[in-house]
Amino acid sequence: MKREQIGELLEKQRKFYRSGATIPVEFRVGQLKKLYAAVKKHENEINQALKEDLGKSEFEGFMCEIGLTLSEISYMISHTRKFARRKTVYTPLSQFASHSYKQPVPYGNTLIMSPWNYPFLLTLEPLADAIAAGNTAVVKPSAYSPTTSRVIEKMIKEIFEPEYVAVVTGGRQDNSALLEEKFDFVFFTGSQAVGREVLRHTAEHLTPAVLELGGKSPCIVDSTADIKLAARRIVFGKYLNCGQTCVAPDYILCENSVKNQFIAEVIKQITIQYGEHPLENKDYGKIINEKHFNRICGLIDPAKTVAGGGTNAAACRIEPTVMDNVTYEDAVMQEEIFGPVMPILCFDSFDRVIDELKGKAKPLALYLFSSDKTHIDRVTRELSYGGGCINDVVIHLATSEMGFGGVGESGMGSYHGKAGFDAFSHYKSIVDKKNWIDLPMRYQPYKSNLYEKMLKKFLR
């Protein structure tokens, strides 16, 4: 879409928002119901698109994308009326007589930019939150998942007028053209590199933004962990979507005394979950494109590979791979892997692990497998990260009851459920002052000792 067309589209959305059409809560709920019905209607097409773009099986497509999307939309249908109500707050005695409250209002015209790894979920979830909060939206799905983007575009055109919700497809030029425009709010999910560009552009317009980024999310396995269960759950989370998950365990920090047992269980679980020949498993999926396939292959050190490592370049597939005796200096530790490669680093001192992690970039997720309450307490209290699990991985994002987001280098802001409604809303603080009394103490001239004593009493 040309820059002029984007400008015209945004102007139409501004006009529609200014009409007040999106403000009534019943309108918002009605649009959410239309969105829910459309997802159900196009479920087969969505599954086929996810299969074509990422090789996802029907089960995984529903479990990780369609099902979670329907759950979020359903949650917002049930809760939007409650979330949109004004909330009365305590009024100080010095403001007598008045009523104080917080009123959530939409930001207005919003831009949602989504990634390719979960192209349906990470487009429709924030859209549901934007609609619930009463905004218009321009949706920009990733060019790397074109089949899913086309289905999203088709579905949105069927149910919404473009002045309310519109889809803009295309590549970097379209992204740049959108970011040159002034929106009231921008929601971006993607890499840290692109996130910096988004923030630079939004800063030019002083536009608030939520950035859902990523990073190297550590997974700690100490000597008190249930090693068999830990291996089973970590293999699931690490190789889900071929490792192309922003909250996948990026690397393992395993206590030396259980390392060999852990590796043996991981290798066993890879075979159980993906078969003797994972590259022939039709449900395993694939890397999104040749560029990322080559990048991930470049991170694999054959000398340190203890499982997997096989590839199929024509199909962009890489076996679930395990690397042992990895150090922080290895290539695989210099960037977010975002692929099916599990580097294992070892430790002897848990205290040292905590100190090292405190000095590293704040990850989007952190996981700990342990039965030691002291270790659990230290990880949850002392370390800064977006979110995570104790004795599991990934599942903390699969709920509308908790906000999901990063901190520091892994992002800013959060969404899902109430947090998503809040992300797309501004809360106005309002004092409704009554006319039947007007205390004179705040007005000049400031002469009365009685008023001065009263004011000091009120404000202390």
Image (cartoon, rainbow, N blue to C red):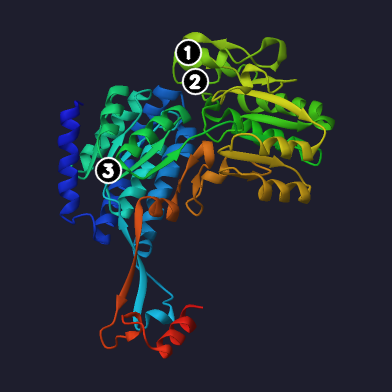
Badge 2 crowding class, 10 Å Cα cut-off, few under 14, some 14 to 19, many 20 or more, is many
Q: Is residue 20 above or below residue 175?
A: below
Amino acid type at mark 3: Ala
Mark in the foreground, 3 or 2: 3
- Give the percent coordinates (x, y) of residue 355: 73, 38
Name the N-terminal-most of marks 3 and 2: 3
Cα distance in 3D space between marks 1 and 2 = 7 Å
- Horizontal side of 304 relative to 429 (left or right) equals right
Location of residue 367 in the rendering, given as x and y in whole percent from the top left corner: 65, 40
In three-dimensional space, the C-alpha distance between marks 1 and 3, rounded to whole angstroms, equals 36 Å
Please count the marks in the image: 3
Q: Tag 3, which secondary structure?
A: strand
Give the residue type at disc 2.
Lys
Q: In which quadrant of the rendered view does residue 267 lie?
A: top right
Q: Are marks 1 and 2 in contact (CB under 8 Å)?
A: yes
Residue where numbered disc 2 is placed:
286
Q: Quadrant of residue 143?
A: top left
The vertical placement of 102 against 127, above or below, is below
Q: Position of residue 121 (x, y in %)?
A: 41, 38
Name the disc covering residue 21, or none.
none
Disc 1 residue type (three-letter): Ala
Q: Which is nearer the N-term, disc 1 or disc 2?
A: 2
Q: Which residue is mark 3?
A: 137
Quarter placement of the N terminus: top left
Q: Which residue is mark 1?
A: 315
